[in-house]
Image (cartoon, helix red, strand yellow):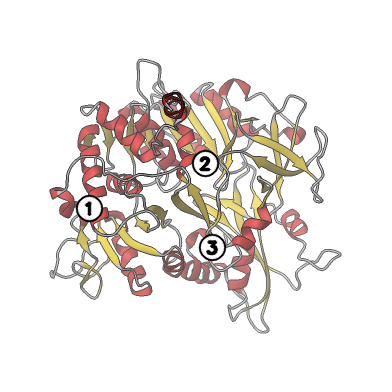
Amino acid sequence: MVANETHQVATEEPEFVSAPALILRSLGADPGRPAITTADGDVITAGDFAAATYRLAHEFLARGAARGTTVTLLTGNTAEALSARYAAGLAGARVVNLYDGMSAPVLAEITTSVDTGILLVDAERYSTAAELLPLVDVPTVLTLGPGPEAAGNGTAGNGATGNGAAGGEPIGEDVVAASARRPAEPPAVRIGPDDDLGIRHTGGTTGIPKGIRSLHGPYRSAFDVAYGGGRDDVPPRLLAATSLAHLAGVLADLTFHSGGTVVIQRSFDPGEVLAAVERERITDLWVLPPLLYRLLDHPAIGRTDLTSLRRVSYGGCAASPSRIREAIKVFGPILVSGYGQSEAQNIAVLPPHEHDRIGHGGRLSVGKPLPGVEVAIRAADGTGLPTGEQGEIHIRSTTVMAGYWKRPDLTAEVLRDGWLNTGDIGYLDEDGYLYLADRLKDKIIVVGGHVYPAEVEELLLTHPAIAQCAVYGVRDAQEAEHVHVAVVPAPGQRPELDDVRAFVTAHKGRMYAPEALHLLPAIPLTAVGKPDKKLLRDSHTG
């Protein structure tokens, strides 16, 4: 009996530690170090940030947040947004971010679809809350701070009336103030690797963006690999100039865990980014390729001290090889390309010393698949293709999503036998490097997210001046994509670009608005009767 008991103890699984708990432990281990520099220049120590986050987690628990519930964040690039995300995770709740650039009706549909129990609003999004709150019925709405100022004294500077979302009604109680009486210690909530971490949204053809379920276990695995843009004696300093609701938030997590500091900017401005790199001695910077080009083209680039930078990461859409070569000359051999998807996390990485890997048509490789990631190139019928031949990219790894939220039909389309069909077209060379050629799914990758043409086409067909239309992406000379629309006008009508842009922005958000409008007598069709978007792209090269 004793021997058996000894055996059981020896083989017992260690307790799972979630990523939020791991991050907070790292912050608490060195409480005096600066953890965050806010967009207003305030410095928050690791100890103060950890204590505030623990208190917030206890407050969320007292208000009903728990495993299986949803905490939705209507937040911008603020320290409070980061704290709220970690606190909700510590409480066991799944987290949903409402992205900037989407219209209030779309945000309302997302808020409702994810079964939001608590909606949190920070100072960057009060005006959006004024539009959103009348459209949703959420049990609890709270502000991450005192809420709009000038209560009862006219119109607040953010566009909300008085101290509230609409008509002077308050947005909600200040949960940060309420949490001050709670203990600054980890809550006793047991979280497992198969519990929901959150739901990330991407484009789709079902009326609202698809929700991608992520679990604690796969996300936690990212912290098993060392991260740090600085030298061994210089902790990383990340500049978060893009949305913390996207990849900048993931990099912030890794930076905190590795003992570094996150410097926050409200949004991307190339001049402000360059100034911050020099002033804050930034070591790590993440940009989408179009934003990288804006940095290269800014007049201050030549007189900015960039010597602190140790890593400039880019990805999210196709990059121009010539502009990447230019960036290497400006920043040095510190560029890192990443290829991944919300459905799969990171898939492949191209480190600085491998940026000479050039494939067909002069296109850069996106790198070798990461350890633990299997990549297969398959034909449309699912059969494997030989090295160098283009086909659909399928991947298998422990980081693949659990599925689409409440959409088993869509999940079954892309997840089969543990393999994810990425929807991308590409090939592997003889050395195992991956190259992207095109996308099977007709999504357009723009700064801020993904645009699915079918969604915009469906909306445009309700416009009284439009009889037929086709929406497609056009790449410019620097490989950045732009939304174009070909339109057959309704009889007696002649739609204008400004009107169409305003119409789409009002219904879907500015991210979806076309940048170019082409009036045609008819939409060209392929032999099988589908809009010939390849022909349209070739006819309008930017």
Tag nearer the camera, 1 or 2: 1
Query: Looking at the picture, how far across and down is residue 424, in whole percent?
Result: 69, 46
Residue 442 in sight here:
no
Disc nearer the start of the sequence (1/3): 1
The part of the image, by quadrant, that contains residue 119 is bottom left
Which class describes the residues within 10 Å of circle 1: few (<14), some (14-19), or many (20+)?
Answer: many
- Amino acid on which the number 2 mark rests in the picture: Leu
- In space, the residues marked 1 and 3 are separated at their CA atoms by 29 Å
Q: Give 149 or 13, whichever is nearer the viewer.
A: 13
Q: Secondary structure at mark 2?
A: loop
Q: Residue at x 45, y 30 (%)?
A: 8
Q: Residue at x 76, y 56 (%)?
A: 534
Residue 219 in sight here:
yes
Residue that lies at the very extreme toward the front in this rendered image: 1
Q: Secondary structure at mark 3?
A: loop
Which class describes the residues within 10 Å of circle 3: few (<14), some (14-19), or many (20+)?
Answer: some
Query: Looking at the picture, how far across and down is residue 138, in whole percent?
Result: 33, 68
Q: Residue at x 21, y 43 (%)?
A: 52
Residue that lies at the very extreme toward the bottom in this rendered image: 492
- Amino acid on which the number 3 mark rests in the picture: Lys
- In space, the residues marked 3 and 2 are separated at their CA atoms by 30 Å
Which residue matches tag 3? 406
Disc nearer the start of the sequence (1/2): 1
Which residue matches tag 2? 288
Which residue matches tag 1? 59
Query: Looking at the picture, how far across and down is residue 319, in whole percent?
Result: 61, 38
